[in-house]
Amino acid sequence: MSNHLQWDDARVFLALARTGTLTRAAKQLGVGTATMIRRLDRLESALGVRLFSRHQNGYFLTDEGQSLLNRAEGLEQAGQAFGAAPMHEVAGHVRLATAENLADPFIIPALEPLYEMHPDLTLELITGTQTVNLHRRDADLAVRMVKPTQGNVTLRTIGTLGFGLYGSSSYLAERKIKSASFVQDSDSLIGWVETSSHLPSAQWIIRALAGRPPKLMTSSLSSQLAAAVAGMGLAVLPHFLARRHGLQCLVAELGVNQQIWLVMHSDLVHSRRIRVVADFLIALFEKNADELTYAKP
């Protein structure tokens, strides 16, 4: 592959690599999709390689495209340093995959200072239940509750999510032994559907039920929380979520706490835009470590 890469070419390449579609890349650069196609074809012809594989749902970097990424981002950083923007500002698009129960109540409310420091930074939060593949560049980095065991990724723990057994004050007031800090045979428990039975919290509920059926089974943490708030029974929930919804803790230590992992594609570790978001997440989770881990921070 040729080493000749101009800044204008790098802008086209980076916009498409980060957004994944011609339409969004063209909008980011303020050009038409036809111009994007023409400039991309010119770049690939000049380099003599195919940089993207074209699919119905978007453009994905080939191995050759991945190898060009750091060089293109180096040109971008040099351009930013040479321009009028202060060096501490970072521009670009970052895709972060995480669980909805972390994104909505915890990460999103804390984003404003990040945007104030980097007004040209844009963030895309992916919180669906679909599998997100960092190697395929479905996202640039991820906050996960399960440690990845394969792929070209760099990872570190950034915290612990603590779980306890919770119920509403109305439910606890109706229990046969109101002060008992254990599961009674008469207790209604909120469990998980079979496809989620591998989760540590689901396993704890199964053991506590001892063969009895749960009062309700759900497929998401948000619905578990809603059921507990509605007084339908006891649920294993993250301390910080249960506390924010006024639930009462019955058992604070269940042995099902989960480590929180920050994962990023190894090729992006030195990217300034990725590093800025990663550092923000690390600081956020460290600052709120007690709230996330313990029943009474």
Image: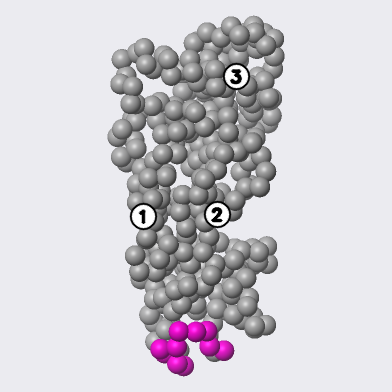
Residue on which disc 3 sits: 68
Q: From the image, which quarter does the C terminus lie in? A: bottom left
Distance from the alpha carbon under mark 1 to that under mark 3: 37 Å
The answer to whether residue 138 is left or right of residue 236 is right
Check whether the beta carbons of the residues at disc 1 and disc 2 lie within 8 A of each other: no
Residue 192 is a magenta residue: no
- The vertical placement of 160 against 114, above or below, is below
Classified by dominant secondary structure, the portion drawn in magenta counts as loop
* Amino acid type indicated by mark 3: Leu
Residue at 65%, 66% (x, y): give it. Answer: 197
Picture disc at residue 145:
2
Q: Dot 1: what SS?
A: loop
Q: Is residue 274 visible?
A: yes
Residue on which disc 1 sits: 288
* Amino acid type indicated by mark 1: Asn
Residue 184 is a magenta residue: yes
Q: From the image, which quarter does the N terminus lie in? A: top right
- The vertical placement of 126 against 7, above or below, is below
Distance from the alpha carbon under mark 3 to that under mark 2: 31 Å
What are the residue bounds of the magenta stretch? 176-185
* Amino acid type indicated by mark 2: Met
Mark 3 or mark 2: which comes first in sequence?
3
The answer to whether residue 186 is left or right of residue 195 is left
